[in-house]
C-alpha cells in the first residue's frame, strides 16, 4: 500500500515538474530550446486597430484603418489639421485590388483624442515612424504573463511609429492638403525612409510665401473669391429653398446648406455637394491652432528640399483649387525641379476626387506605376552609391506640366 502511495506521489511530482518546465518555456520566448514562433498562430489582419504612441494605458492612441487587398503598402495622410480620414478613402477606392492603403486619424482628430499639450507639428511628423518597423513596445501573453517584445526608441511620434509598426523600410505616402505638408515634412526629416511622395491638392509647400510670389497668391485669392460666389451656388440653395427664413430650416436642411456653402469653396461642380460627408462636430478645429503654434520659426521650403533628394514626387491638383486658383504658384514653384511631376486636373477643386473621380484614380495609378518604371532606369549616384538618384525631365519648363480633361490626357 505504501509503495503504491509513493509511486503515486512520484508520478504527481514528475507531472508537476514537467508542467512547470513547460510553463517556463512558454513564459520565456528567448529560451533556446523552444521556438515560440513555431507555435504562435499568425495574427489575422485587422481592418482597424490602434497605434500606441507610448504606454498603452497612459499615452494617446491613434486610430488606424486598413483598406485594400494589394501587397504594396501605401500610407494615406488626410488634410486638416483636425480633420479625419474617412473622406479620403473615396480617392483610392478604385485601386483597392492593387494596393493596401493605411489611413489613420492624426493625433487630436476625431478617433485619436490627445491632450492639447501633446499636439505639435513635430509630434505629427514623428507619429509616422514607429508604425513602419514594429519597433515599439508590445506585450505577448504566455499563460497569463506578459513579455515585452522590442522597445520604442526615445522621442518617436506617429509617422515614425506608423512606419515601424508596418515593418516597412521605405514608405510611399499619399497626402492631401495639410497631409501633403506633413508628408513633405516627414520626408525632409527622414529622406532615407521615403520611396515616393504623391501630394494631392497640397497646402503651401513654401511657408511663408516668398515676397516675390505674393502678387500671384493675391491674384489667385481674388479669382477664388469670385468663383465661390458664382450663380450656381445661389441656384443650388434656391432649388431646395435653403435661403428662406420662415419656416425655420430643419436640422437636415441646415446640414445641407452648410455642405453647399462648403462645396462652393472645395468643389468645382456645386451639384456634387451631396458627396460630402462629415464636417461640423467631426472636425476638431483647435488642433490646427495648436499645431500652427509649433511650426518651425524659419518656416519651410519643401520644393528646395525635393531638389536634393532621389525619391520621385508627384503633385496632382485641380485647376480650381481655392488655395492656388489657376495654379500660378505651383506652376512657378515646380519649374526646374526634375524630381517633380505636376498633373493639373481640369474641372476640379480642392477635393479633386469628388469632382473627377475617374481621372484622379488613373492619375494616381500612373504616378504609382511611374516609380517602378523610373526605378528600373535609375543610375547610382557616384558620390553616394547607397542612394540612387533618379533623374526625370518632368518640370524643367511648362512643357513638363500637363492638364487632364479625360482619361487620355497623359503625357508620354
Image: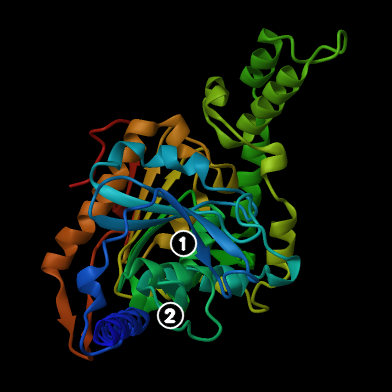
Position of residue 384 relative to residue 188, above or below, is below
Question: Which of 263 and 225 lies nearest the eye of the viewer?
Answer: 263
61 to the left or right of 354: right
Residue 278 x, y percent position in the rendering = 62, 35
Position of residue 343 relative to residue 8, above or below, is above
The answer to whether one can see residue 177 in this image is yes
Question: Which of 42 and 245 lies nearest the eye of the viewer?
Answer: 42
Q: Write down the quadrant of residue 263 in the picture.
A: top right
SS at badge 2: strand
28 to the left or right of 76: left
Residue 152 x, y percent position in the rendering = 48, 82
Disc 1 packing (10 Å; few <14; some 14–19; many ≥20): some
Q: Which residue is mark 2?
A: 147
The answer to whether one can see residue 229 in this image is no
Which quarter of the figure is the N terminus placed in? bottom left
Instruction: Single out the residue that lies furthest toward the right.
Output: 246
SS at badge 1: helix
Q: Residue at image x 68%, y 78%?
A: 297
Total numbered labels: 2
44 to the left or right of 324: left
Position of residue 384 relative to residue 167, above or below, is below
Question: Which of 9 and 186 lies nearest the eye of the viewer?
Answer: 9
Say whether disc 2 or disc 1 marks the residue closer to the N-terminus: 2
Q: Residue at image x 65%, y 53%?
A: 82
Q: Which residue is mark 1?
A: 333
Residue 37 x, y percent position in the rendering = 24, 73
Q: Residue at image x 40%, y 31%?
A: 356
124 to the left or right of 174: right
Disc 2 packing (10 Å; few <14; some 14–19; many ≥20): some
How far is mark 2 from mark 1, CA to CA? Answer: 52 Å
Position of residue 346 relative to residue 330, above or below, is above
Evaluate if marks 2 and 1 touch, with contact meaning CB atoms under 8 Å apart: no
Amino acid at each position: 500500500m505504501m509503495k503504491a502511495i509513493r509511486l503515486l506521489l512520484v508520478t504527481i511530482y514528475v507531472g508537476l515538474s514537467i508542467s512547470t518546465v513547460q510553463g517556463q518555456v512558454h513564459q520565456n520566448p528567448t529560451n533556446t530550446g523552444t521556438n515560440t514562433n513555431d507555435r504562435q498562430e499568425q495574427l489575422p489582419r485587422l481592418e482597424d486597430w490602434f497605434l500606441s504612441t507610448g504606454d498603452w494605458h497612459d499615452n494617446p492612441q491613434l486610430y488606424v484603418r486598413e483598406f485594400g487587398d494589394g501587397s504594396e503598402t501605401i500610407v494615406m495622410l488626410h488634410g486638416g489639421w483636425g480633420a479625419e480620414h474617412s473622406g479620403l478613402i473615396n480617392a483610392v477606392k478604385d485601386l483597392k485590388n492593387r494596393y493596401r492603403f493605411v489611413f489613420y486619424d492624426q493625433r487630436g482628430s476625431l478617433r485619436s483624442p490627445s491632450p492639447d499639450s501633446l499636439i505639435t507639428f513635430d509630434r505629427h511628423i514623428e507619429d509616422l515612424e514607429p508604425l513602419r518597423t514594429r519597433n515599439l513596445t508590445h506585450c505577448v501573453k504566455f499563460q497569463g504573463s506578459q513579455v515585452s517584445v522590442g522597445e520604442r526608441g526615445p522621442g518617436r511620434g506617429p509617422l515614425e511609429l506608423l512606419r515601424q509598426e508596418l515593418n516597412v523600410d521605405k514608405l510611399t505616402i499619399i497626402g492631401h492638403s495639410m497631409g501633403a505638408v506633413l508628408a513633405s515634412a516627414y520626408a525632409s526629416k527622414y529622406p532615407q525612409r521615403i520611396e515616393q511622395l504623391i501630394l494631392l491638392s497640397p497646402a503651401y509647400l513654401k511657408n511663408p510665401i516668398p515676397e516675390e510670389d505674393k502678387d500671384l497668391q493675391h491674384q489667385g485669392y481674388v479669382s477664388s473669391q469670385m468663383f465661390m460666389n458664382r450663380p450656381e451656388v445661389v441656384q443650388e440653395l434656391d432649388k431646395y429653398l435653403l435661403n428662406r427664413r420662415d419656416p425655420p430650416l430643419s436640422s437636415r436642411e441646415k446640414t445641407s446648406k452648410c455642405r453647399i456653402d462648403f462645396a462652393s469653396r472645395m468643389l468645382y461642380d456645386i451639384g456634387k455637394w451631396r458627396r460630402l460627408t462629415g464636417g461640423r462636430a467631426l472636425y476638431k478645429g483647435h488642433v490646427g491652432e495648436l499645431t500652427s503654434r509649433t511650426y518651425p520659426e524659419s518656416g519651410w521650403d519643401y520644393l528646395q528640399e525635393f531638389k536634393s533628394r532621389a525619391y520621385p514626387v508627384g503633385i496632382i491638383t485641380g485647376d480650381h483649387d481655392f488655395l492656388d486658383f489657376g495654379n500660378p504658384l505651383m506652376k512657378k514653384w515646380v519649374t526646374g525641379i526634375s524630381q517633380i511631376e505636376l498633373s493639373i486636373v481640369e474641372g476640379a477643386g480642392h477635393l479633386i476626387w469628388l469632382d473627377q473621380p475617374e481621372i484622379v484614380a488613373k492619375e494616381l495609378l500612373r504616378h504609382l506605376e511611374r516609380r517602378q518604371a523610373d526605378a528600373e532606369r535609375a543610375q547610382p549616384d557616384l558620390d553616394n552609391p547607397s542612394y540612387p538618384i533618379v533623374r526625370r525631365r518632368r518640370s524643367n519648363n511648362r512643357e513638363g506640366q500637363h492638364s487632364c480633361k479625360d482619361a487620355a490626357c497623359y503625357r508620354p
